[in-house]
Image (cartoon, rainbow, N blue to C red):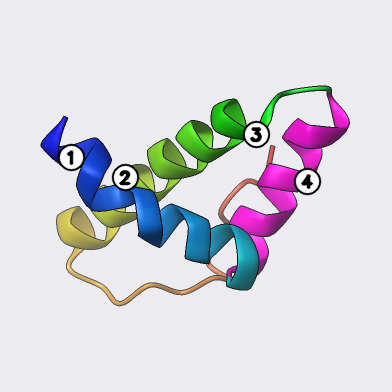
Amino acid sequence: AQLRRALYFPALSALTHNPIIRAFGDRLKGNGKRGKVVLCAAMRKLMHIIFGVLKNQQPFDPNAGLAVS
């Protein structure tokens, strides 16, 4: 619950301003997913990005080959 609470507003912001997360959310909405499902999926996507940054100890690079699928 604390992790969801911590990622709620960053996910909302990412759906608006981050081109990778925005394209991901648009694809899900196009597939008929509802708003909260899209938001939770964006939160999960952010967690994967955060984990990758921490694991590799490299700054986030949106052109580094993230698969937007």
Q: Which of 17 and 51 is in front in this view?
A: 17
Queried whether the magenta region covers residue 27, the answer comes back as: yes
Q: Are marks 1 and 2 in contact (CB under 8 Å)?
A: yes
Element at badge 4? helix
Sequence-wise, which precedes: disc 3 or disc 4?
4
Residue at 36% across, 48% down: 8
Q: Look at mark 2 in the image and give the residue it sits on.
A: 47
Q: Is the magenta stretch mostly helix, strand or loop?
A: helix
Queried whether the magenta region covers residue 8, the answer comes back as: no
Say which amino acid is labelled 3. Answer: Gly
Q: Would residue 27 appear left or right of 61 to someone viewing this image? A: right
Q: Where is residue 6 in the image (x, y as percent from the top left)?
A: 21, 51
Q: Position of residue 34 (x, y in %)?
A: 69, 26
Which class describes the residues within 10 Å of circle 1: few (<14), some (14-19), or many (20+)?
Answer: few
- Residue 3: numbered disc: 1
Sequence-wise, which precedes: disc 1 or disc 4?
1
Q: Are marks 1 and 4 in contact (CB under 8 Å)?
A: no
Element at badge 2? helix
